[in-house]
Image (cartoon, grey):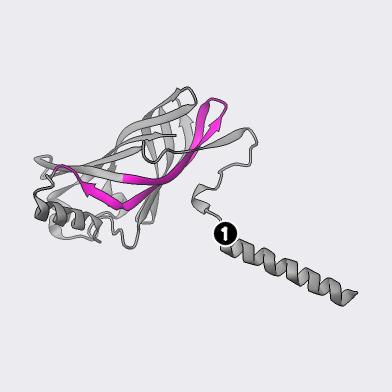
Amino acid sequence: MNRFLLILFSSILFFSCKKTINKPIDFALVDQSQNGNLTKEIVDISASKIYWKGTKMRGLGKHEGEVKLKEGFFLIDGDKVVGGKFIVDMTTINVTDIPEYETVPRRNLNKHLKSDDFFAVSEYPFASFEIEGINLNQVSGTLTIRNVSKKIQIESEITKVQKNFKITSSFTINRFDWNVGYTGSWIDKTLVDKNIQFTIKIVN
């Protein structure tokens, strides 16, 4: 009898472990709270947009482009956004203000943005922003780029249309705070301005 129970227990343990291995947890989208009043609304990737703009030579020139959202969610309490997390696919970063027919400069800048001088996407393919508090139009949270996490506050507009939520914001970061170009060449540190502006629209 004891031998039978041992075999049965071992079988259950084996198949349970096997199921866990074959279906890993997506930690990027784990709920931030066990509060039963909160609901999670998955972000609409195709409708959400993230734009960037960087200047050079103290504003005498600029480049701008887009980077795509990989996944994300809002945490909703009643009819208000109270939290959320958004994962950005940095391998998709590209420049849009160089015409497509100018293939060489467009390709070179895209390659440079993805290189170790800037976002090092081969080593750090994802960036993220996690909302930790909302006070009127002030959204506070943690921004992670190149595995560097820092607290930021951004001015945002949060709206709701029927059952859909939308966050829009335009904010600027000092790229050196996230080691973006920190170890780059002298040209990267001086001719390319330190600030990068992001304009976002996140919807579910």
Which quadrant is home to the C terminus?
Answer: top left
The residue to which callout 1 is attached is: 23
Q: Considering depth in this image, is 132 or 68 the residue closer to the camera?
A: 68
| Residue 19 in the figure: left or right of residue 90 | right
The kind of residue on which mark 1 rests is Lys
Question: Residue 5's x, y, as percent?
Answer: 84, 71
Q: Is residue 46 visible?
A: yes
Question: Residue 64's x, y, as percent?
Answer: 19, 42
Question: Residue 67's x, y, as percent?
Answer: 29, 46
Q: In this view, does 79 lie above or below 3?
A: above
**Label 1 packing within 10 angstroms: few (<14), some (14-19), many (20+):** few
Q: Is residue 16 above or below residue 78?
A: below
**Residue that lies at the very extreme toward the right in this rendered image:** 1
Does the magenta portion include 174? no
Does the magenta portion include 90? yes
Magenta stretch, residue numbers: 68-97
Q: Is residue 19 above or below residue 169?
A: below
Which quadrant is home to the N terminus?
Answer: bottom right
The residue at the point 13 percent across, 47 percent down is 100
Q: Considering depth in this image, is 181 or 68 the residue closer to the camera?
A: 68
Q: Considering depth in this image, is 177 or 142 the residue closer to the camera?
A: 142
The residue at the point 57 percent across, 59 percent down is 23
The dominant secondary structure in magenta is strand
| Residue 132 in the figure: left or right of residue 35 | left
